[in-house]
Amino acid sequence: MVANNLVLVPGAGGVGRTVFEHLRAKDVPVRFMVRRDDERAAELRALGAEVVIGDLT
């Protein structure tokens, strides 16, 4: 992914997923922060997102 205009989405839930879909439709690179490296994280990677593990709390 290109670092220019990269967007970090903290959370892979409903709102985060909607934001992701809109940004990817415009070819904006997206990085998700998720708490666990689970099946949702794998699905996001498969859709073209970069995934990092972390906890904002």
Image (cartoon, helix red, strand yellow):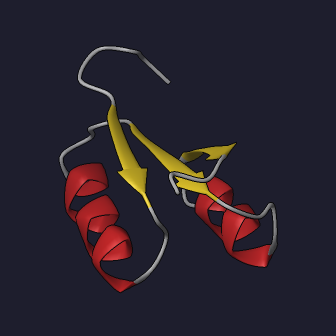
Q: From this view, report whether residue 8 is shown above or below residue 37.
A: above
Return the residue found at the far front.
57
Q: From this view, report whether residue 37 is shown above or below residue 39.
A: above
Q: From this view, report whether residue 5 is shown above or below residue 26.
A: above
Instruction: Tell whether 32 sits left or right of 18.
Output: right
Is any part of residue 48 visible from this angle?
Answer: no
Is any part of residue 18 visible from this angle?
Answer: yes
Instruction: Tell whether 54 sits left or right of 38.
Output: left
Q: From this view, report whether residue 50 is shown above or below residue 13.
A: above
The image shows residue 39 at horizontal and vertical percentages of 79, 76
The image shows residue 50 at horizontal and vertical percentages of 58, 41
Tell me the residue at 34%/69% (across/down). Answer: 16
Tell me the residue at 38%/52% (across/down). Answer: 9
11 or 31, which lies in front? 11
Residue 17: image quadrant is: bottom left
Return the residue found at the far bottom.
14
Residue 2: image quadrant is: top left
The image shows residue 32 at horizontal and vertical percentages of 50, 50
Tell me the residue at 81%/70% (across/down). Answer: 38
The image shows residue 52 at horizontal and vertical percentages of 65, 42
Residue 22: image quadrant is: bottom left
